[in-house]
Amino acid sequence: MLHVLVDENDQTAWYPNYLSGLKKGLVSAGVPYTFSPTLPEDPQTPILITRFTLFDMIKEASPVPQHLYIQEHDVWNPFTNVLDLESLWIFRHPSLKAIFYTNPSMVPWGKRCLPPGSQVEVIAAGFPYDHDYVNATLNGITPSDEREKLIVFPGRMNEFYQPYLSVRLAFEFMELGYRVVIASPVTPLSHYPVAMWRELGIEVGRLPHAEYYQLLSKATAAVSVTIGGSLTLALYEAQLLGATPIAPKGRDDLPPFTEMYSPRYDLLHPREAIDMVENKVSVTIDTRWFSIDAYVRTILDTVSKH
């Protein structure tokens, strides 16, 4: 039995997709499981913690669970402005067996957060992406080779996704005749001059998920300027909906963690992103990191060892 600890109050757009894909994978594998916002009564039951917001439940647990596994959807890195090492106390918990990250370049950063001599496994597991969410939009779209001259900048409007750089590139795209939308899945923080950006011709703000998918289904490209990121799911969805995913890269040993997209533009030379769009560069995606079966197999193989 695998106990999947879930956060019923999570408001992120991707989390329902993660849980749905995980559930489908466990059903397909014939593995007994429970999805619950509470801890199991038996402390020997293996627990997969799906969000960092649930860590405090472990701190307060009695009896203490003996087999903990954490799914980390992001990783602390030098470009994150909210790093609090005390929040990583669970990485030192004696019951912690493994930490799963979404892609390989996160693994060494995850290991940096562990105490010296730790026996905790740090594993690249991917993301169990449930395509039903996008397929519902695809089923209502008439295929066309013509794309609107439209650029979408996805990502929350916070420092992690560099909205000021998005705006700077937006001006240059607009000079080339593109319509530009900065589409945040959450309401933009109040200190960003959103009204001013709108006056200057940029469409910016929060979009309902269905409307966002419809936008991608018309767009030429989706451009990410994240300085962290993980699988950058928004770009994967853009590809599924026919828009070219334009992803950033840094040095091999530094974020952003977007190595499943190829080619990518140099984040220190962001105009390369414009060149990729204008030159109609073809981008491929290593889809194994979005596989439900591969993700669940990694989780189950790891749990079975403990």
Image (cartoon, rainbow, N blue to C red):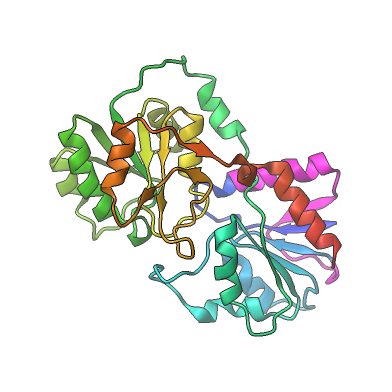
Lateral position of residue 26 relative to residue 129, left or right? right
Q: Would you say residue 161 sits in the magenta stretch?
A: no
Q: Is residue 212 left or right of residue 118?
A: left
Residue 209 image-quadrant placement: top left
Residue 177: percent from left, percent from top = 19, 29
Q: Does residue 89 lie above or below 30 as drawn?
A: below
Q: Quadrant of residue 282?
A: top left
Task: Give the image location of residue 211, x and y in percent.
Answer: 40, 32
What is the x, y in percent for residue 166?
27, 49
Question: Is 71 in front, or is 230?
Answer: 230
Above or below for 201 versus 57 = above
| Residue found at x 63% / y 51% | 126
Give the side of residue 145 with respect to residue 180, left or right.
right
> Along the line of sight, which residue is nearer the eye, 248 or 187?
248
Hey, which residue is sitting farthest bottom in the picture? Answer: 116
Depth check: give the residue in front, 156 or 206. 156
Residue 176: x and y, percent? 18, 32
User: Residue at the location (15% across, 35% down)?
Assistant: 175
162, 288: nearer the viewer? 288
What is the count of numbered marks?
Answer: 0
Q: Is residue 42 magenta?
A: yes
Quadrant, the C terminus: bottom right
**Quadrant for the N terminus in the image:** bottom right
116 up-or-down from 295: above or below: below
Q: Read off the magenta span.
A: 17-44
Quarter location, residue 151: top left
